[in-house]
Image: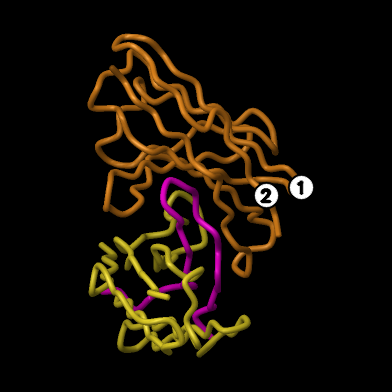
Amino acid sequence: KQEVTQIPAALSVPEGENLVLNCSFTDSAIYNLQWFRQDPGKGLTSLLLIQSSQREQTSGRLNASLDKSSGRSTLYIAASQPGDSATYLCAVRSSITGANSKLTFGKGITLSVRP
Amino acid sequence: GAVVSQHPSRVICKSGTSVKIECRSLDFQATTMFWYRQFPKQSLMLMATSNEGSKATYEQGVEKDKFLINHASLTLSTLTVTSAHPEDSSFYICSARDRRFAPTDTQYFGPGTRLTVL
């Protein structure tokens, strides 16, 4: 059974700092990995999706990397801003077919960027 | 990007009543829809997966007679919580993907529905 872990559960940094959010998963046989952002009381916004054959994806100040063999992914946020404050969720898809085609989520990291 | 809407965003009901939540994909065909529930400071837990025109597949421990899912069209899925009780109070989030574009497709999420059962 796939398990996704995100540590620490919460992080507070001053504005402008570059930071790395970590995600680990137990079963390396994944098809893709996705990073999401969730604001309080809201749904999820997809940030980046990395296919299993890829090493990283970039979007603006965000860069996500994937090391499938070691079961790890990182989300790098450059020059953090107060507007980046949110919960960041990592999720892996373990199969693309049938009832097993589902995302397994970590509990998320709640980021607070102080002005 | 693709948009998924949910209605209502918040609902408060009395214990024993049934509540229906709608999930719509606004600008793409959702061949597959997912329903999740999320407790405070917890991860999203998948409740069920439904493919258009087929019966939903429920995760272990989820009562299919209590959480009725209907995915009648490529743009609409509904979750009905029957005979709701206070322990059903949670944040329910739907999600949709167009599996014709698998495995590169992205799963899009709705804004969620906060259910409070008194």
**Residue at the extreme front:** A115
Residue drawn at x 52%, y 85% as measured from the top left: A63
- Residue B99 sits above or below residue A10 on the image: above
Residue in the foreground of this view, choosing between B16 and A70:
B16
Please, what is the three-letter code of the amino acid marked with disc 2?
Val
Residue that label 2 marks: B3
Asked whether B106 or A28 is in front, the reply is: B106
Quarter of the rendering containing residue A2: bottom left
Q: Quadrant of residue A95?
A: bottom left
Residues at marks 1 and 2 touching, judged by CB atoms closer than 8 Å: yes
Q: Secondary structure at mark 2?
A: loop
The colour applied to the residues of chain A in this rendering is: yellow
Q: Nearer the viewer, residue A98 or A2?
A: A2
- Whether A49 is among the magenta residues is yes
Magenta region, residue range: A25-53
How far across and how far down the image is residue A79, in percent? 50, 87
Question: Number of labelled discs?
Answer: 2
Q: Which chain is orange?
A: B
Q: Split into 4 quadrants, where in the image is the C terminus of chain B? A: top left
Q: Chain of mark 2?
A: B
Quadrant location, the N terminus of chain B: bottom right
Q: Residue A89, how many percent across, how many down?
A: 39, 65
Q: Is residue B79 left or right of residue B3?
A: left
